[in-house]
Image: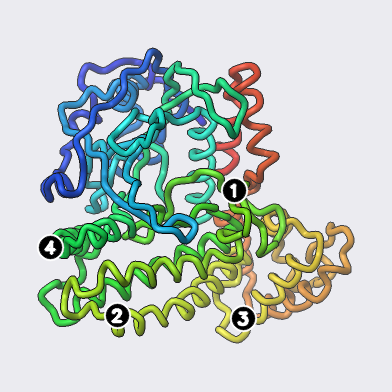
Amino acid sequence: MTVPESSQSPVSRNPFLSLEYETALESLGDDYYDLVEAADFPTHILRFRGDRLLPKLGLDPKQVSDDHFIESFGKFGSSRPFLALCYHGYQFGEYNPRLGDGRGFLYGQVRGTDGKLYDFGTKGSGTTPYSRGGDGRLTLKGGVREIIASETLARLGVNTSRCLSVIETGEQLWRGDEPSPTRSCVMVRLSQSHIRFGTFERLHYLRRKDLSKTLLDHVMDVYYPHIDRQQPQAYLQFYRELVDRTAKLAAQWMVAGFCHAVLNTDNMSITGESFDYGPYAFIPSYDPKFTAAYFDYYGRYSYGNQPLVCKLNLELLQQPLSGVTPDLTPEAMSEALKEFDRSYETNYRQGMLRRLGLLNLDETDGRELVKLTVDLLRDNEVGYHDFFSQLRQQFSPEWRDNPDAIFAKADPPQILQPWTALYHRFLQAYSTTELKDIQSHLAAVNPNQIPIRPEIEAIWEPITQADNWQPFYDFLDRIWA
């Protein structure tokens, strides 16, 4: 990661504190949140700054110093109220009414240069009424892992939250699932919204349809503004679009070879955005049974189950939405949910073809190529991410005229022969100029490296052993190369 030279020079006026913060969620009232304070930390060392995000906020990275990040997102020098949001959720199939923001809060909401409203949300910023006996902190390794996940997913075209900053805070934390004591940090993420499926589930649990209606109106006005709430079936149209957005997100995860690992309803965003990365993993090879979380004993949230779980979570959401407005009936929502499978299949096929570089195939040919690709990755010892990386690196316009050149460096090459024959056949329809465009497209959508678990550990080890952050920054540069 390249840090602008001028970023080390303090500027008296902090650009983050001068942003025009909006009170969209705050104005709904304290039925939806609790006011909290940030923890005081003994140390503040900026370890990551999301400079790629600053232009979206109308900020020039060269005019934002490290001190500005620390003042705003480490020392929390703001006069705005911090809101710990309230929600419930189904966790591994069991309803849990004892949730809520237990180690974070909504720092503020800002309108981006694209006209959309974005949340600044913290993680590791201290205890709240929902900490349930926890310390409200985040391990430094957890912060590093979240940066790696969100940056990689963004590079792969997944609709994801992003890390705005990670600041090491100088505390020692004790965790049972990793060597202790371990270092601490506070993270700020930029996301479309922190309203979850579980936000509505809590209101249903409290039997407050009035609050559900207020929140639903807010969601539609802010995140689905193209839907006119005064039109008949408007709220049902919202649910249909949420089904489509969620199906698209599930397809994006599957195309990316990503296993979220904890798809509880409190981790499902009402905007269809991916967020909150804990025990996630990128699959090393195509295995639908691959499970990322060590505590997912029965594989409920395995890689291959993700579309099914997302559909189930949408079905569970029908209960808290049912009857909030006349058009949100169980029958109407059940009918709308039937579109999930079609939307998922279409988005998965298009996403795979995007990574394969052949966007212009018709539906029949596209299905054939995607099926053969999945069969190849599933049935042979071909690394999932290596396949797409090698396709990017080896592709040449020569492949159209010389089928023997396709993956000529593969070992053993015979396992690829059915795939290379089909890929070559489809290349015949492309001109020389179009083939060069394919080459550029493959470089744009397929990173040279994906952080499977051993690579994440290799990035973390120099940090924990020698406080050497260079491999981490080098990795982020490679992701975006």
Q: CA distance from mark 2 to mark 1?
A: 33 Å
Front-most of 78 and 347? 78
User: Could you tell me residue 378's position as x and y percent?
Assistant: 74, 67
Q: CA distance from mark 3 to mark 4?
A: 46 Å
Give the colour scheme of this rendering.
rainbow
Residue lying at 87% horizontally and 58% vertically, measured from the top left = 411
Residue type highlighted by circle 4: Asp
Front-most of 397 and 320? 320
Vertical comparison of 74 with 152: above or below? above
Tag 3 and tag 1, C-beta contact below 8 Å:
no
Q: CA distance from mark 3 to mark 1?
A: 35 Å
Q: Secondary structure at mark 2?
A: helix
Tell me the residue that label 1 is attached to: 295
Mark sitting earlier along the chain (3/1): 1
Residue type highlighted by circle 1: Phe
Front-most of 266 and 250? 266
Tell me the residue that label 4 is attached to: 210
Mark 2 vs mark 3, foreground winner is 2
User: Which picture quadrant has residue 394?
Assistant: bottom right
Q: Residue 330 — which label?
A: 2
User: Could you tell me residue 1's position as x and y percent?
Assistant: 51, 31
Tell me if residue 221 can be seen: no
